[in-house]
Amino acid sequence: MSDRIIRTGPLAVCLTLALSVGVSAQSLSIGGQNGVNAGISTNNGLGASASVGGSNGVNANATVGGSSAADANASVGGSNGVNANATVGGSSVADVDASVGGSNGVNANATVGGTNGLADVDVTVGGTAPGTTPGADDGTGNAGGGLTPAQQEAFNNMSDSERRDLLRRCDSVNAGSYDPQLVALCRLLKLSAMR
């Protein structure tokens, strides 16, 4: 028992001294960058992170304070895996992002407050929305590529009331006030509803 105290005693003293003198970060690593890692930071608030298997493994971090009041991130499988992010405070009141399969997979974003007004909701299935290229000098936009089969199926699988609500929401979306991708998506949804 006293042997264990002697071996762990210096570690406890170092941690206590480091925290008492205001050291901004502490971390523990087993197996290097692709092993098991954990860290705590007091720069611009309080942050904690954990990683198993490196950037393409299982990763999580949380921050309180700093540029956002609170921020939490989780990732399984890296940027093309399953990812989630939630932020409260910062440049918007609340922001939530979810992604499965990276930028060409299923992606959702919801923002309350911030530069996009009261609420902004974006959903993408299968990559970026088509048909977002600005038109020529005469002000006409391009026709766009239409909905992908997966997007058309998702729209068709909505209940009648969900489709009506979505199309009603699209009535207020105009090119001067909204993101070009959202404008293009609403245009495509309206065209699909007419079929």
Image: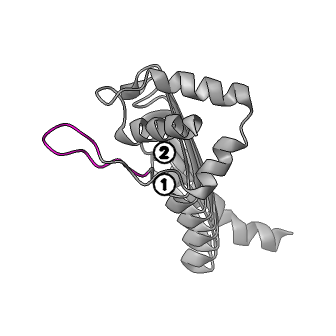
Q: Residue beneath label 2, please?
A: 42
Residue 62 seen in the figure: no
* Secondary structure that dominates the magenta span: loop
Magenta region: which residues? 130-141
The residue sitting at 68% across, 29% down in the picture is: 162
Q: Residue beneath label 1, please?
A: 25
**What's under tag 1, amino acid-wise?**
Ala
The residue sitting at 55% across, 58% down in the picture is: 126
The quarter of the rendered structure image containing the N terminus is bottom right
**What's under tag 2, amino acid-wise?**
Thr
Residues 153 and 108: in front is 153
Per the model, the C-alpha gap separating discs 2 and 1 is 6 Å
Residue 2: in magenta span: no
185 is higher (above) or lower (below) than 7: above
Q: Which mark is residue 157?
A: none
Residue 90 seen in the figure: yes
The image shows residue 122 at horizontal and vertical percentages of: 51, 39
User: Is the C-beta separation of discs 2 and 1 under 8 Å?
Assistant: yes
Q: In the structure shown, which secondary structural element does the residue marked by tag 1 occupy?
A: strand
The image shows residue 50 at horizontal and vertical percentages of: 63, 59
The image shows residue 194 at horizontal and vertical percentages of: 55, 35
Residues 195 and 27: in front is 195
Residue 148 lies in quadrant: bottom right
Residues 50 and 133: in front is 133
128 is higher (above) or lower (below) than 118: below
